[in-house]
Amino acid sequence: MQELEQIFEREMRKNNLRVTNNRWAIFRILAKVDKPLSIREIIEISNKEGYFTSVYRSVESMTKIGILRAVPRGFKNLYELGEAFRLHHHHLTCEKCNCSIKIHAPRLEKMMHELTMQAGFTPTKHHFELFGICKKCRIKPINMV
């Protein structure tokens, strides 16, 4: 964790952002969990109700410089640590219970790179999410009459 914190401090300073208690709290929360969180979930975990605007602004500034990564989920974003802290990955999310798993797919990465090049673009970044119904949600409960 100490190495991650050093990277966090270095990236914040390199991008002229202050290392505030609020930003430390957001970073530490996301470093401890293994799934993307909403801003509301970050606030609940930090026990700082009423600071939505402050947390939102910190999350947005940290996302702009790559410390955090936005994961689109419907009409809102969830957030997780960026690639300086976690291996590049995508997500597969259940449409019913919203559980999410990480996907590491080298073949997919290669294909997206090739498609970008074929279109005459220079690849810079990409975003790819999959949705489906998990095994738990596919199992229908037995109706008792």
Image: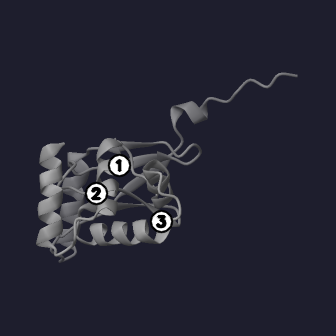
Amino acid, disc 1? Ile
Residue at (46% x, 72% y) in the render: 53
**Spatial CA span between label 1 and label 3:** 15 Å
Judge depth for marks 1 and 3 and give the one in front: 3
Q: Which residue is mark 2?
A: 24
Horizontal and vertical percent position of residue 56: 42, 69
- The residue that mark 3 highlights is 51
Q: Nearer the viewer, residue 62 or 119?
A: 62
Residue furthest right in the image: 145
Provide the secondary structure element on which disc 2 rests: helix
Work out how far the residue at label 2 is from the one at label 3, CA to CA, in angstroms.
15 Å
Q: Is residue 69 visible?
A: no
Residue at 22% across, 65% down: 19
Along the viewing direction, whichever of 101 and 49 lies nearer the viewer = 49
Q: Amino acid at mark 3?
A: Tyr
Q: Which residue is mark 1?
A: 29
Question: Quick one: label 2, few (<14), some, or many (20+) residues within 10 Å?
Answer: some
Q: Secondary structure at mark 1?
A: helix
Residue 80 sits above or below residue 143 on the image? below
Q: Please tell me which of labels 1 and 2 falls first in the chain.
A: 2
**Tag 2: residue type?**
Trp
Q: Residue at x 74, y 23 (%)?
A: 142
Q: Is residue 113 left or right of residue 74?
A: left
Q: Quadrant of the C terminus?
A: top right
- In which quarter of the view is residue 35 placed? top left
